[in-house]
Amino acid sequence: MAKAFALAEEGPRHGPNPRVGCVLTDRRGLVIGQGHHRGAGQAHAEVAALEQARLGLADTRGATAYVTLEPCNHHGRTGPCSRALVEAGVGRVVYALTDPNPAATGGGDYLRDHGVLVEGDVDPGRGIALNRAWVHAMTTGRPYVTLKLAASLDGRAAAADGSSQWITGAPSRVHAHRKRAEVDAILVGTGTFLADRPKLSARLPDGSLYEHQPLRVVVGERAIDAPEYLHIRTHEPAQVLRQLAGLEVTHLLVEGGPTVATAFLRAGLVNQLDCYIAPALLGAGGLASLGQLGIESVDGALRWRTRRLERIGDDVFIEVGR
């Protein structure tokens, strides 16, 4: 299973499908095939592993499949993996997490009904962590929301004159662009868009583009002259997420500014904070990274759990979640 998870990590972090890895072993416990899902429309991990076994002329009858997610049981862009495993004569299937997608779940029951020994939910925590955004989207029907904040040590996103480039250092910007390349959509408000005209693209250090580019979204009712951006004319975060869910967005990155960031927080729709903290001070004249959240006392503070803490150049990156 550890190898299956390592394989799954090689899959794309963006898109409507989860990352999945599969390892096939024969009756002696020797690996005869392995694979991972490479993205929407591509072979699923189980089918990729079976194909590798066939190419190696391995006998899959009585084999064991270790999979990071319950084999799917529906016809989507590809056929059901549960049926492929049965047809290959696989005798045992071990999976880490039951599929939370109501349209695809049921593979475990199908396998049992066809005489396959099934061990399910053997490592659900790791299974969820692998596909945190996708699991959230499947269970709630709305995209997982990451809010990015870049601020000085005293919580300022810009100086008194409004200048904000660059509070953080170049290594943090490289890191932030890599994170952009891992999401389905990136969002700013009309205020930020009209003031800064951000490209909202995911760029490599040399200025070239990552292969995957997120959908670029601008939210607000003011007119913008940019047909290459999706303009959602509302101030309601829930309405934004409903529209993006219809476009198969599972992971949304909210980059600002303070007004839209505050709106998503006040609506209780932020799942993760990506915070870049620079060792700089801007003082009381600087502009706060967030607006009024309606919190009157420490007891009412929005509390999060630290998932990752990383030094990037002279800056600190902190990932927190619920």
Image (cartoon, rainbow, N blue to C red):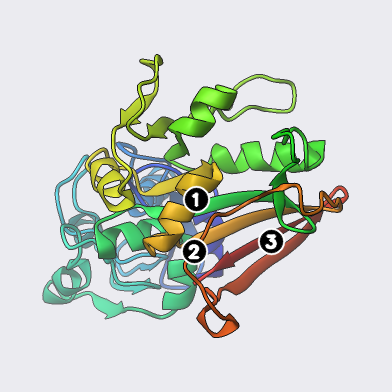
The amino acid marked with disc number 2 is: Leu
The amino acid marked with disc number 1 is: Ala
> In this rendering, which labeled residue sits more in front, label 1 or label 2?
2
> In this rendering, which labeled residue sits more in front, label 3 or label 1?
1
Q: Give above or below for 15 relative to 113.
A: above
Please report the residue visible at 30 percent of the width from the left and 36 percent of the height from the top: 41
Q: Give above or below for 163 relative to 26.
A: above
N-terminal of the pair, mark 2 or mark 3, is 2
* Labelled disc at residue 261: 1
* Labelled disc at residue 318: 3
* Labelled disc at residue 20: none
Q: Give above or below for 135 relative to 263.
A: below
* Distance Cα–Cα, label 3 vs label 1: 17 Å
Identify the residue at the far bottom of this view: 299
From where the camera sits, is residue 205 visible? yes
Q: Return the x and y of residue 39 as percentages of the image width and height.
A: 39, 40
Q: In this view, does 176 lie to the left or right of 29?
A: right
Residue contact between numbered discs 1 and 2, judged by CB atoms under 8 Å: no
The residue that mark 2 highlights is 293
Please report the residue visible at 55 percent of the width from the left and 47 percent of the height from the top: 258
* Distance Cα–Cα, label 2 vs label 3: 21 Å
Q: Return the x and y of residue 20 as percentages of the image width and height.
A: 41, 56
Q: Please tell me in which quadrant of the rendered image residue 255 appears.
A: top right
Residue contact between numbered discs 3 and 1, judged by CB atoms under 8 Å: no
Q: In this view, does 155 lie to the left or right of 311?
A: left
N-terminal of the pair, mark 3 or mark 1, is 1
